[in-house]
């Protein structure tokens, strides 16, 4: 009896489970279930791969050991990671998946039987899996470094576009050389590996830190394609289809993220946003007005409508909880409090929603970009806390600004704007913000959490 | 020319069809996703790309018990990919849990 058909049938079932899971993940009401269904599909696929008939020594001890080590590390880090660090985590996880595809490619080169025809599908798929996996690995690591701040945007290569194109040509040339040799030349394989690893670095380094979410999404797609490449080595359907599903949906998600920022993918990849310094580009007089906490407390208590614009700075200061307390205190005074969430607030689209949900802020208080902008003219006070680029009016009218064209929260339509900020430094995109010098704007300098703490006390006392 | 034709045997063509059709499916499957779900969806899809772990499992299972180079490479591969799989699904679940908690209260 031939078991391989039964195995393929079982794989097909887990592919269907994957698809149902992924579909569920893309709708709010079914997302949680979708994730669990996808995890179930993965569990099924792994179990099938463990028991499908194979010709080797099985070496189950090695497999179980590795699964326990990896699973344990994965579970612990997933439980411990702070929600603000989520983008870094996803980036790191993604790089590890890429590393696995790369290792498979390397190992299978070593396993090619002597006398293998080099100009063959087997060699081509090995090259592909190794290349794609390596790019995903180093690219994700650079993205990780940029997000956690250990790599700054001024860490760049000279003439990045030239280096990128040269590396790509080199990679293609090496691949052709490997395939046209009479027999396997491991020196060429290692040269290809080295150049692929380098290309991942060269590809991500010139892209600004503010665009890392898009890059991670793209690299996620790349890892999926790497999984497909590894699947082609073994003719394994679940790897091929699972990988390509992630590859294709990852591209779509990447494009959607770019659309949320009103930019094209090409513009993100070669646009070099974060690296440029960006002048103020504004003719406003650079005079900053400050407000003190007790005045602000009174102003807030007598307001009818207050809108909070949270940014990554709020999350970094861990101030979302105290923000929620202020919201409650003001609601007790009869003030209507809302949150305006920019699509790219935080470090990833949807990141801020997760952070506020963590602090028990009610869902229906969150306004998306358009309803928020509609509500600003009737809003008395807007509190901008730790946000900068997403409220920068130069995105509207200053064509020389690197963020020109990005939709912003137009807080200047409100009657008063108070900006909570550490100092006058520029935002993540490195662009000066004319909002700070606006007529209706007042600044409250200091650590967001400390300022909000004082504000809360003042509201209670006033 | 012969080599190219050798490439395009029945098996390769079947594989190619599978690739093309799956790409279309992947592009259609997620459709319009609200921004609030971008982060969890990315993280969940990332976990699915850990399906590459199966390749490392096959690699080790096919190896000789004395082929330590392959075994070590495969061991590292499985461990890294399992971090991706388990960590990815767990972290996605944690994110989505927070939304669920909210919905119940309202």
Image (spheres, coloured by chain):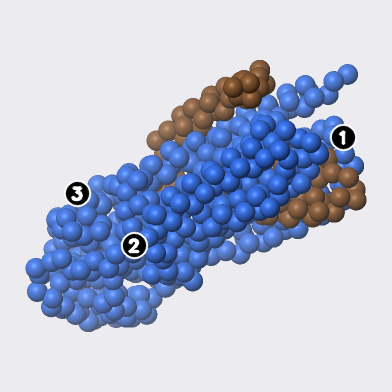
Chain colours: A blue, B brown
Return the disc, 2 or 1, that comes first in the chain's sequence: 1
Q: Nearer the viewer, residue A315 or A430?
A: A430
Q: Which disc number belongs to residue A55?
A: 1
First of labels 1, 3 by sequence position? 1
- Tag 2, which chain? A
Q: Do labels 2 and 1 share a chain?
A: yes
Among the two numbered marks 3 and 2 on one chain, the one whose residue lies closer to the N terminus: 2
State whether residue A251 appears in this view. Answer: yes
Q: Assign a secondary structure to mark 2.
A: loop
Which residue is depicted at the point 26% across and 77% down? A424
Name the spot of residue B18 as percent of width and height, x first: 59, 24
- Identify the element where label 1 is drawn: loop
Check disc 3 and report the residue beneath it.
A374
Q: Residues within 10 Å of mark 2 (few under 14, many from 20)?
A: many
Residue plotted at (47% across, 69% down): A151
Q: Name the residue under label 2.
A: A274
């Amino acid at each position: 009896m031939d078991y391989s058909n039964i195995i393929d049938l079982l794989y097909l079932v887990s592919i269907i489970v994957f698809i149902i899971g992924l579909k569920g993940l893309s709708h709010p009401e079914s997302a949680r279930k979708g994730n669990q269904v996808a995890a179930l599909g993965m569990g099924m696929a792994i179990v099938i791969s463990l028991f499908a008939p194979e010709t080797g020594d099985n070496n189950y001890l090695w497999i179980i050991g590795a699964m326990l080590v990896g699973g344990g590390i994965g579970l612990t880090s997933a439980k411990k990671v702070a929600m603000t660090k989520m983008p870094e985590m996803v980036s790191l996880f993604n790089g590890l998946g890429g590393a696995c595809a790369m290792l498979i490619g390397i190992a299978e080169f070593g396993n090619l039987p002597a006398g293998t025809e080099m100009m063959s599908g087997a060699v081509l798929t090995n090259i592909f899996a190794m290349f794609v996996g390596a790019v995903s690995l180093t690219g994700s690591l650079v993205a990780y470094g940029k997000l956690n701040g250990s790599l700054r945007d001024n860490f760049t290569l000279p003439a990045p576009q030239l280096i990128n194109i040269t590396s790509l040509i080199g990679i293609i040339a090496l691949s052709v050389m490997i395939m046209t040799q009479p027999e396997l030349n491991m020196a060429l394989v290692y040269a290809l590996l080295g150049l692929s690893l380098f290309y991942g670095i060269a590809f991500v380094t010139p892209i600004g830190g503010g665009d890392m979410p898009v890059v991670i999404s793209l690299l996620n797609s790349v890892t999926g394609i790497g999984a497909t490449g590894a699947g082609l080595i073994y003719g394994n359907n679940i790897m091929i289809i699972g990988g390509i599903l992630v590859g294709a949906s990852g591209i779509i998600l990447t494009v959607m993220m770019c659309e949320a920022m009103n930019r094209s993918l090409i513009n993100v990849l070669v646009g070099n946003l974060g690296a440029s310094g960006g002048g103020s580009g504004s003719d406003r007089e650079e005079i900053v007005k400050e407000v003190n906490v007790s005045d602000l407390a009174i102003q807030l208590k007598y307001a009818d409508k207050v809108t909070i614009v949270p940014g990554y700075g709020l999350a970094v200061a861990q101030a979302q909880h105290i923000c929620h307390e202020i919201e409650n205190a003001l609601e007790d005074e009869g003030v209507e409090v809302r949150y305006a969430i920019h699509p790219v607030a935080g470090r990833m689209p949807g990141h801020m929603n997760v952070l506020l949900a963590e602090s028990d802020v009610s869902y229906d208080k969150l306004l998306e970009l358009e309803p928020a902008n509609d509500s600003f003219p009737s809003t008395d006070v807007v509190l901008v806390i730790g946000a900068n680029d997403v409220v920068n009016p130069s995105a509207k009218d200053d064509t020389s600004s690197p963020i020109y064209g990005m939709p912003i929260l137009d807080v200047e339509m409100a009657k008063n704007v108070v900006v909570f900020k550490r100092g006058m430094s520029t935002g993540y995109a490195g662009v000066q913000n004319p909002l700070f010098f606006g007529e209706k704007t007042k600044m409250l300098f200091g650590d967001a959490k400390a300022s909000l703490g004082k504000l809360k006390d003042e509201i209670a006392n006033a | 020319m012969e080599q190219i034709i050798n490439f395009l045997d029945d098996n390769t063509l079947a594989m190619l069809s599978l690739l093309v059709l799956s790409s279309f499916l992947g592009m259609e499957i997620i459709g319009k996703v609200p921004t609030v779900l971008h982060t969890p969806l990315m993280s969940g899809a990332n976990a699915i790309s850990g399906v590459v772990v199966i390749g490392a499992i096959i690699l080790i299972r096919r190896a000789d018990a004395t082929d330590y180079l392959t075994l070590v490479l495969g061991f590292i591969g499985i461990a890294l990919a399992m971090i991706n799989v388990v960590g990815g699904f767990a972290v996605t679940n944690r994110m989505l849990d927070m939304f669920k908690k909210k919905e119940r209260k309202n």
